[in-house]
Amino acid sequence: MASVEALVDLLAKAREKTRSLVVEAEGRFTAVGDIHGDYRTLGQILEEWESPYLFLGDYVDRGDMGLEVVAEVLKLYVEGKAVVLRGNHESPVMNIEGGFLDELCEKIGSRCGAVYKEFEKTFASLPVAAVVNGKIVALHGGIPLKEDMTPASLEDLRRAGGDLVTPADPLVFQALWNDPCPCDTYAPSPRGPGAWLFGRKITKEFHAANDTAVLLRGHTYVPAGCAVHHGGAVVTVFTSAVGPYRKTKPKVAAVRQNVEVYDLSTKEPARCPEDPDLL
Ligand SMILES: [Mn+2]
């Protein structure tokens, strides 16, 4: 790990990089699901899979190398080699309980409180969704629901704002927290108040409104490392194999006009379970 000054500088540069909560990206990407401090798996991806990368959030907490992971991911972001999205673990309420704040204090000592404040600002600045080649929507959690329980559009999400540190905006919060369910409309999420499960009708309306085809997301632990939902209109990838996730078979996805999931180690196309009940 480089010096604390270099870390603070990297965090500031990452903040300058983001222009909008929803970003557009063109080309072919290697998409990576939750890493949660799994530096070894991240290293394997960077060695064996092509850039540019599309990171779907949750870099820190649970695994014990969150600092190294988030620094590497943000470095790639600043260098223009990766699109870096925010996960629900890129927020203070998670990092106090989840391990990242403790890890930071162990590794950098008494300045950790001040440096964490820099992380807070950088996490709040990250985009929450990317639209790849106009067709693939990438985000960490799921489709946000408006107050009338219809899906928010990408335009609604682009216009969200207010306190982004928490984040307090319900649409931003849900983009980081929601999960798909094998249901038609929606249901309250077992993750807690403010989060929802979204069903196949919501997914269909969302894609119709945005003229998109696939929602690619992370967020949910699946031992297979992937899952497909709603007839292929939603794909989950999970890429951490440390701590509580050590039995995972990590996956990555190749994103062009469509999404193809591959096993990280064998590099074979993955067989992902269909419509599993995730929570
Ligand atoms: Mn998550």
Image (cartoon, rainbow, N blue to C red):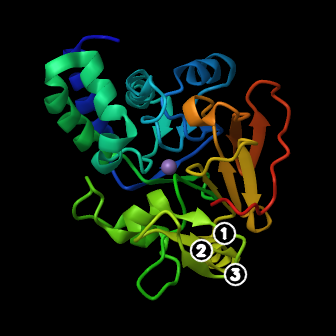
Q: Position of residue 130 (x, y in %)?
A: 50, 52
- Point out the image quarter for the C terminus: bottom right
Q: Quadrant of residue 202?
A: bottom right
What residue is disc 3 on?
184
Please name the residue shown 33% across and 26% down the image: 103
Secondary structure at badge 2 equals helix
The amino acid type, in three-letter code, at marker 2 is Phe
Q: Position of residue 64 (x, y in %)?
A: 45, 24
Q: Is residue 171 visible?
A: yes
Q: CA distance from mark 3 to mark 1?
A: 8 Å
Q: Position of residue 235 (x, y in %)?
A: 69, 55
Evaluate if marks 2 and 1 touch, with contact meaning CB atoms under 8 Å apart: no
Please name the residue shown 46% across and 68% down the image: 195
Q: Nearer the viewer, mark 3 or mark 2?
A: 3
Q: Categorize mark 2 by other alpha carbons within 10 Å: few (<14), some (14-19), many (20+).
A: many
Evaluate if marks 3 and 2 touch, with contact meaning CB atoms under 8 Å apart: no
- Point out the image quarter for the N terminus: top left
Count how many numbered circles sit on residues in the image.
Answer: 3
Mark number for residue 213?
none
The amino acid type, in three-letter code, at marker 3 is Asp
Q: CA distance from mark 2 to mark 1?
A: 15 Å
Q: Name above or below for residue 227 compared with residue 173.
A: above
Q: Name above or below for residue 210 compared with residue 265.
A: below
Q: Categorize mark 3 by other alpha carbons within 10 Å: few (<14), some (14-19), many (20+).
A: few
Residue in the foreground of this view, choosing between 134 and 193: 193
Mark 3 sits near ligand 1, with its Cβ under 8 Å away = no
Please name the residue shown 47% across and 35% down the image: 62
Q: Nearer the viewer, mark 2 or mark 1?
A: 1
Q: Position of residue 230 (x, y in %)?
A: 74, 68
Secondary structure at badge 1 equals loop
